[in-house]
């Protein structure tokens, strides 16, 4: 059971905009910034977003993040077939005193 | 370009100590800007942060691992290591090493599969 809650699946068609959520509590998302990772099967996770909405160098601006209250969201615009992957959110938890992750959302591009 | 590569035994017996090493290229493990982490991914895909080592050897471990975990650095080999004691079947996972500053993990190594079984 992951500390952060993500819907298990999401889907979209090429060119569409998709949004996925990450829900937490006041101990984690409510007081700390959120990261988002993309994991293609059989590869390591890749950082997409840090500090709620900051993209590392090389990440297209089709990816955007936001945080409000105890929830965070990742949006992917102009969906491409290569975006088909698992997406994880993560943040610091003040009660557990550890970095914690969501269970992941599997994005299917149909 | 920073790159990381994990190495270690693919199979460990229950109650034994798991030792993994992460070889780093592109930056020194002594660079005080970087935190060197271990993260594992269970067969059901869930991720768990184990801890990190930073600066001159300071460590911070996930409290859920109690006293089972220790990390160290070998600057002469530009590597850092994880030791996890008293392993059980529940420790079966893909183990990743990763770096970053204090607020993110990037990049990650490709991961190494560890199975705990007799």
Image (tube, rainbow, N blue to C red):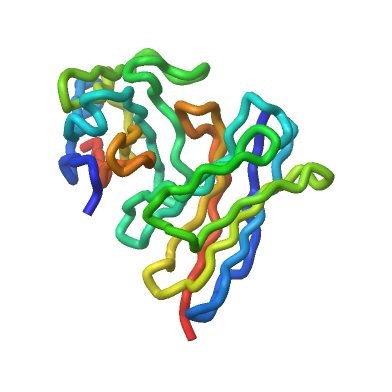
Instruction: Identify which residue, B27 or B69, lies in the foreground.
Output: B69
Rendering coords of residue A60 (x, y %): 42, 17
- Location of residue B15 with respect to B3 vertically, above or below: below
Relative side of A78 to B16, left or right: left
Looking at the image, can residue B34 be seen?
yes
Rendering coords of residue A110 (x, y %): 21, 37
Farthest residue, direction bottom: B118
Instruction: Identify which residue, B91 or B69, lies in the foreground.
Output: B69
Instruction: Identify which residue, A50 or B16, lies in the foreground.
Output: B16
Rendering coords of residue B106 (x, y %): 52, 32
User: Which residue is found at the position 49% from the left and 63% from the top?
Assistant: B68
- Location of residue B91 with respect to B35 vertically, above or below: below
User: Which residue is found at the position 58% from the left and 56% from the top?
Assistant: B70
Rendering coords of residue B41 (x, y %): 40, 54
Farthest residue, direction right: B76
Relative side of B61 to A38, left or right: right
User: Which residue is found at the position 64% from the left and 48% from the top?
Assistant: B5
Q: Quadrant of the N terminus of chain B?
A: top right
- Location of residue B83 with respect to A67 vertically, above or below: below
Quadrant in the rendering for residue B43: bottom left
Relative side of B36 to A35, left or right: right
Looking at the image, can residue A12 be seen?
no
User: Which residue is found at the position 65% from the left and 58% from the top?
Assistant: B7
Quadrant in the rendering for residue A48: top left
Quadrant in the rendering for residue A26: top left
Relative side of A69 to B115, left or right: left
């Amino acid at each position: 059971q992951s500390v952060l809650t993500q819907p298990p699946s999401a889907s979209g068609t090429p060119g569409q905009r998709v949004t996925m959520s990450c829900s937490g509590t006041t101990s984690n998302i409510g007081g700390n910034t959120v990261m988002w990772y993309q994991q293609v099967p059989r590869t390591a996770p890749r950082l997409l977003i840090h500090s709620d909405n900051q993209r590392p160098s090389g990440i297209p601006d089709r990816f955007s993040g936001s945080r409000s209250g105890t929830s965070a969201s990742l949006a992917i615009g102009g969906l491409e077939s290569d975006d088909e992957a698992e997406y994880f959110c993560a943040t610091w938890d003040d009660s557990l005193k550890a970095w914690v992750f969501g269970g992941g959302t599997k994005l299917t591009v149909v | 370009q920073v790159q990381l590569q994990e190495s270690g035994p693919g199979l460990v017996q229950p109650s034994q100590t798991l030792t993994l090493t992460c070889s780093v290229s592109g930056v020194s493990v002594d660079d005080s800007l970087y935190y060197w982490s271990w993260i594992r991914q269970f067969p059901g895909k869930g991720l768990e942060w184990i801890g990190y080592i930073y600066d001159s050897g300071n460590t911070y471990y996930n409290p859920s691992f109690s006293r089972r975990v220790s990390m160290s650095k070998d600057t002469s080999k530009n590597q850092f290591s994880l030791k996890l004691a008293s392993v059980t079947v529940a420790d079966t996972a893909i183990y990743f090493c990763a770096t970053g500053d204090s607020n993110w993990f990037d990049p990650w190594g490709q991961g190494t599969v560890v199975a705990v079984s007799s």
